[in-house]
Amino acid sequence: MADHGRDGGDPMSTASTRPLAGITVVTLEHAIAAPFATRQLADLGARVIKVERPGVGDFARGYDERVKGLASHFVWTNRSKESLTLDLKNPEAQAVLKRLILEQADVVVQNLAPGAAARLGISYEALASEKPGIIVCDISGYGNDGPHRDRKAYDLLIQGEAGFLSVTGTPDTPSKAGASVADIAAGMYAYSNILAALFHRANTGQGRHIDVSMLESLVEWMNYPLYYAYQDAPPPVRAGASHATIYPYGPFPAGDGGTVLLGLQNEREWLAFCETVLRQPALATDERFSSNSRRHGARDELRAIIAEAFSTLNTDQVITRLDEARIANGRVNDMADVWSHPQLAARNRWREVGSEQGPIPALLPPGIPGDADARMDPVPALGEHTDAILMALGLSREDIDRLRAAKAI
């Protein structure tokens, strides 16, 4: 797959300097968790070959048509990959997959149904016996063993199982996160564990089996509320967009109908908030609000005081006062606001990537400083790279035509 360098120099020279240049990942993936992990490997220069079903592909391709006719989830998680179509129910296609892995892959990632990889002969145990340096990452809802192993797992279901819904929403209504946090958590742990496994292999020559579950990934993110509820202590309450245990910390209305987010962390900030923002310095020594626990206990009274003070100010005026007091604050942006966020523009974070429908805007990956280090290649069309990958394996044009006629590719 061609690398589209953006530094004005030799694109292949740029590609060779990326951290994962020379690493090949073969991935049997769908939805979000595994594609998000492997896209980040591609961001760092790895070659990622995405195996998809002929004619259908990753079912995330069909989630919606919001990006020039392409699916928003798919565009987000699949740039810079190569698409290879194989019907893995066909023995010849299975043989091609096994050959591709053994001859070219450093890493195999899969989030198929439990047991499917073993049936295809691409489990870690099967591959490591022939290729000891192989790294295999399995991503699933609940892990490779245990009583829940075979249960279907979607992001919402894992948010519930991990306790996330119990602390998110309003007192009356539990609410899921607006983003796929269970998928994202699993994708991030898969990504970081694969990087660690590559270091391990560089030091020892040995591969590694990685078993990432969505449940364990999101429960790790839930450790603060877990510890807060340690030994049957009352858990954090659902507090909407406010903090469950710190006050004032959350959204407050301004007089123009806007909403300002603010958060106080200590008594110094409380004093500055009373003096500079509310212009009511006497509140700073009011016994009702003299500590965070007291402010939290009297949150309804304090909220009314803050709302009254903000009712005569517009959103910009509230933010100006908060900035003067050095109180952390932010706006409640909608998606249109984020597209035009001045900080992203000032830091030059937007780029364009190709697709079968033309160029699409895309953010540089967080932490990657600029064009010379980021791989920002196109979102692949279904099966776009099949012929090239198979020919590189040594298959002839006649072999490929025969496999296509047999609907194996």
Image: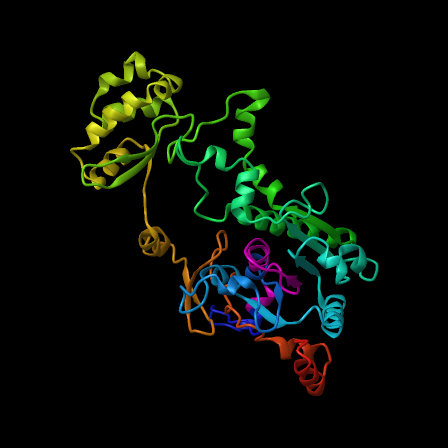
Is residue 134 at least partly visible in the picture?
no
The image position of residue 307, as x and y in percent, is: 23, 29
Q: How is the image coloured?
A: rainbow
In terms of image quadrants, where is residue 47? Answer: bottom right
In terms of image quadrants, where is residue 406? Answer: bottom right
The image position of residue 233, as x and y in percent, is: 54, 20
Is residue 264 at least partly visible in the picture?
yes
User: Is 83 on the left-hand or right-hand side of 164?
Assistant: right
Outermost residue to the bottom: 398
The image position of residue 278, as x and y in percent, is: 22, 26
- What residue is shown at x 64% (from left), y 50% (from top)? 140
User: Is 291 on the left-hand or right-hand side of 310?
Assistant: right
User: Is 186 on the left-hand or right-hand side of 344?
Assistant: right
Q: Which of 304 and 260 is in front in this view?
A: 304
Residue 122 to residue 289: above or below: below
The quarter of the image holding the C terminus is bottom right
The residue range painted magenta reads: 14-39
- What residue is shown at x 50% (from left), y 25% (from top)? 235
The image position of residue 74, as x and y in percent, is: 50, 62
The quarter of the image holding the N terminus is bottom right
- What residue is shown at x 23% (from left), y 19% (from top)? 281
Q: Nearer the viewer, residue 217 or 233?
A: 233
Outermost residue to the left: 312
Q: Which of 112 and 395 is in front in this view?
A: 112
- What residue is shown at x 46% (from left), y 42% (from top)? 176
Q: Does the magenta stretch include residue 80?
A: no
